[in-house]
Amino acid sequence: MRNLITIIIALLIVSCSSEKQYDLTVKGQVKGLKKGTLYLQKVKDSTLISVDSLIVNGDPTFELHSDLETPEVFYLHLNKTNSDDKKIAFFADKGITEINTTLKDFVFDADIKGSKQQEKLDEYKKVMSRFNDRSLELIKEEFEAKTNRDSIAIAENQKAYESLLKGKYLYTVNFAINNKDSEVAPYVALTEIYDAKIKWLDTINNALNPEIKSSKYGLMLDEFIKDRKSE
């Protein structure tokens, strides 16, 4: 009997040790979701790939996993019958990221808690939303000016738009420099102001801490700048 118990314990130890240990766990709830498929995705070699998935059938809670070498942006993708594909972007780091949202407003209702990078990205997006709101106002004003054939209003609108765009770029540059120790800095440079003056991108790149320079987005930013300079 003693030998049998020893064997059972040994088998349990082997079984537990053989379970895959993941760097990233994404869990949460999609309120109102009864059926559908959730995918955990990321970009690899310019292609969006799925690293884990879960078929939801009644239970709106979920848990997905992935390996993670360096902090990067992942996507929680909901594919539901008779519904458009929806994706929640979030900045992931090793550990647990919790995402709670609703089926009705999958993207806009998303409450994301996890990495310090996500907190920085939320901070950035909060300010960017003001720029975006003003941009929508200018689009409306431009339409009205063109409808009324008001050349003066059209010219003023164009100047206002150019000023807004410059303000958005300068804010992003300053944000990146002030957060040079975060992977979010090169990420926003690549995704928000990739078409900015090369000197601005250089300023961000040169300000990055060595650890961030060697991160996924740090390396991508450096390569992107080299490519633009060679054009």
Image (cartoon, rainbow, N blue to C red):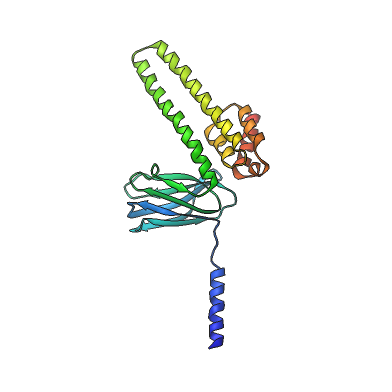
Depth check, front residue: 121 or 227: 121
Residue 173 screen position, x and y as percent: 58, 31
Task: Locate residue 198: give its quadrant.
Answer: top right
Tell me: residue 209, above or below residue 96: above
Image side of residue 59 versus residue 208, left or right? left
Relative to 160, 13 lies left or right: right
The quarter holding residue 203 reads top right
- The image position of residue 18, as x and y in percent, is 56, 68
Q: Which residue is painted at 60% across and 35% down in the image?
A: 178
For the C terminus, which image quadrant? top right
User: Residue drawn at (36%, 55%), measured in percent from left and top?
Assistant: 60
Q: Residue at x 61, y 34 (%)?
A: 177
Query: Horizontal and vertical percent for residue 37?
Result: 39, 53
The image quadrant that residue 2 belongs to is: bottom right
Q: Is residue 161 left or right of residue 93?
A: left
Q: Residue at x 41, y 45 (%)?
A: 110
How many marks are shown on the rendered structure? 0
- Nearer to me, 125 or 82: 125
Q: Is residue 209 above or below residue 98?
A: above
Q: Can you give x and y, in whole percent of width and height, for residue 180 in the image?
A: 62, 38
